[in-house]
Image (tube, rainbow, N blue to C red):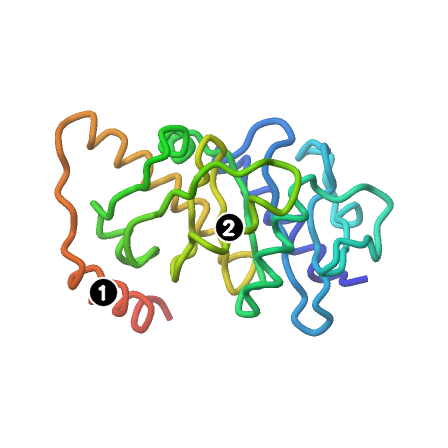
Amino acid sequence: MLTALREEVYRLHLELPRHNLVVWTSGNVSGRDPATGLIVIKPSGVRYEDLTAENMVVVDLAGRVVDGSLKPSSDTLSHLVVYRARADLNGVVHTHSTFATAFAALGRPIPAYLTAMSDEFGGPIPCAGYAKVGGEEIGRAVVEGIGAGPAILLQNHGVFTVGSSPEGAVKAAVMVEDVARTVYFAVSMGQPREIPPEEIERAHRRYVEEYGQ
């Protein structure tokens, strides 16, 4: 079932350790099939080197396993809250990447100090409050706090990113950690200057409408 999406979600999971966004079995990627509404997600507690396209788990929007012999990720309920609330999204990623999670541990958003943030995120990366792990609370915090951007930090926890595709959500997760690392060092050197909101809007619009092929 959903062979192509399973392969894509499996392949995208390998990008997380490749970009140093996860350790051991932490983190997950999910993708929604627009035709059926079914979700493909990582199995719980399986190391990245043991993942295959075949052991990805297919669930419906209620969290019932439709196909797969393993338990889905412990973050599945949070992913599903996001999908139920946002019909425009077909990819969700969760990581505990080091620099971004350092901001989350402090409960701090990442201000828009970099042009890369204007381009990719359209503004600062917000930080939601603390939410309990294991149920729908984290998903609700993501939906309520993420705004129009593709990324949010969760206090004391980590990072959630979203996209119109699973690949778009993974790209956002990579970019979150990249800008968090740069901002961390910039703040340690002094006080960075925020980009004015009107320039953020102009740069983001240009990036969305003109960048790439």
What residue would you read off at disc 1?
201
How many circles with numbers are drawn on the protein? 2
Question: In this rendering, which labeled residue sits more in front, label 2 or label 1?
Answer: 1
Circles 2 and 1, Cβ within 8 Å, touching? The answer is no
Residue 74 is marked as: none
203 w.r.t. 72: above or below = below
The Cα–Cα distance between marks 2 and 1, rounded to whole angstroms, is 23 Å
- Name the amino acid type tagged 2: Val
Location of residue 103 in the rendering, given as x and y in whole percent from the top left corner:
36, 33
Describe the element under mark 2 as helix, strand or loop.
helix
First in sequence, mark 2 or 1: give its number.
Answer: 2
Q: Quadrant of the N terminus?
A: bottom right
User: Which residue is more in the foreground, 4 or 100?
Assistant: 100
What residue would you read off at disc 2?
170
Image position of 64 (left or right of 87)? right
User: Which residue is more in the foreground, 103 or 168?
Assistant: 103
Bin the neighbour count of mark 1 within 10 Å (Cα to Cα): few under 14, some 14-19, many 20 and up: some
User: Residue sitting at 34 percent across and 55 percent down?
Assistant: 121
User: Residue sitting at 57 percent across and 69 percent down?
Assistant: 87
206 w.r.t. 10: above or below = below
Describe the element under mark 1 as helix, strand or loop.
helix
Location of residue 96 in the rendering, given as x and y in whole percent from the top left corner:
50, 34
Bin the neighbour count of mark 2 within 10 Å (Cα to Cα): few under 14, some 14-19, many 20 and up: many
- Name the amino acid type tagged 1: Glu
Outermost right residue: 69
Image position of 50 (left or right of 177)? right
User: Residue sitting at 71 percent across and 60 percent down?
Assistant: 61
Image position of 178 (left or right of 133)? left
